[in-house]
Image (cartoon, grey):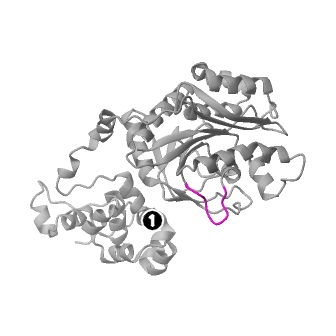
Amino acid sequence: MARIVGGIGSSHTPTIGFALDARKQSDPVWAPIFAGYEPVQKWLQEKRPDVLFFIYNDHVTSFFFDHYSHFALGIGEEYAVADEGGGPRNLPPVKGCPALARHIAMALTADEFDLSYFQGKPLDHGCFSPLSVMWPHEGGWPGAIVPLQVGVLEFPIPTARRCFRLGRSLRRAIESYPEDLKVAIVATGGLAHQVHGERAGFNNTPWDMEFLDLLERDPERLAELTIAQYAERGGLEGAEVIMWLIMRGALSAKVRKLHSTYYLPSMTPIVTVIYEDDPPTAAQPDAGFRERIARELAGIEKLPGTYPFTLDRSVKAYRLNHFLHRLIEPEFRRRFLSDPEPMFEEARLTAEERNLVRRRDWRALIHYGVIFFLLEKLAAVLGITNLHVYAAMRGETLEEFQKTRNVQMLYSVAGQGAHVKR
């Protein structure tokens, strides 16, 4: 069974990553930053978690307002460092843990939390600024992460209460995971600061101290506060500390604080804390919860010729699905029809994936993990109707398949200049 070894709270200001990259360890102005993370490094070295469940918010880097979710769970195999305008930091990508992420997704969904999922997106300073000083990374990171991106920039955002409840559900999700994993919960952001408008530069150290005290002793009181109250006390951007309630909710009602440090050099306080359950609590197997997690899809495997597009299929076939999705771009379509071979190489498709596309093997593409709605895009580009694809997936000729329809018609999703093969 997986178990939670403790929780970490950390600011995620880019100041932290800048200090590391600029080698400011010996500068007296910057040295307190590194001193604050030394206990975190030692604790992680001692506990040796296999996975960090990493709660952060993106800063309009990989997540833009064309699609902005409250809770976006990373399900991918690897996460690179994002370019935020001046080139990405020189850090290696960090491995994901897709199996644990899938289980958490199923568990949180069973508890009626609405999630979106992401992969193939680089992570910005909200993750890598604190991570780079917590974990050694020369030659690679010592473990994996499951990132949770919380949408705290575009209002309305999740309530403090919602975050706290999600943390409680997260604990049950992790402790019901059957593999023997050690997981640390890391929450980032804050504390009191504001970076926009005439109030830019706002700080409130007394509120920060009160917040940390309540987080440890009485998180329910923090869950009662509105976002406006958080903004009044800690600045609008400082309201992102509601993410810390996810971490706190995943711990026991009573916790032991092992470490806390606070340093306010400029715009944002740089804070680190470590909590453990008090007393340490063993994971309690809950067969009923595991059964409820699996309930919605239980028995679906018995349906012949039916392949739900699950998260594991999404991760496995991500490269190929992403390649086919780009067929909505006119220039990509033109290149594909002219000579797809160099494009296969650019997309790093495997030999199997390339052969599936070359052969137009519709049934095998579905079996591999391509979602149908990208197959119909490929078909439209090639001038093939949806009906041809349906027939091929059933192993029938078009004429045989049409005999099973009430009306014999042909159509595709091509909007302009469609050339339908008959």
Q: Is residue 13 visible?
A: no
Element at label 1: helix
Residue 31 picture location, percent across and down? 84, 47
In this view, 400 is above or below 172: below
Q: Residue furthest right?
A: 28
Q: Residue at x 19, y 58 (%)?
A: 305
Give the image quarter of residue 184.
top right
Crowding near the residue tagged with mark 1, few <14, some 14–19, many ≥20 C-alpha atoms within 10 Å: some
104 horizontally vs 16: left or right: left
Q: Where is residue 7 drawn, in percent x and y?
A: 59, 38
Q: Which residue occupies 74% across, 31% down?
A: 192
- What residue would you read off at disc 1? 319
Number of numbered discs present? 1
Q: Is residue 372 shown above or below 250?
A: below
Q: Quadrant of residue 65?
A: top right
Side of 375 relative to 36 (left or right) = left
Q: What residue span does the magenta drawing correspond to?
A: 136-143
In the rendered image, residue 142 lying in the magenta stretch gets the answer yes
Residue 337 visible at all: yes
- Prevalent SS, magenta region: loop
Quarter of the picture containing the N terminus is: top left
Q: Position of residue 345 (x, y in %)?
A: 49, 77
Q: Tell me where residue 149 appears, x and y as whole percent.
A: 56, 44
Instruction: Tell me: residue 333, above or below residue 182.
Output: below
What is the three-letter code of the residue carrying label 1? Arg
Of residues 185 and 70, which is closer to you in this image?
185
From the viewer's side, name the closer residue of 175 and 295: 175
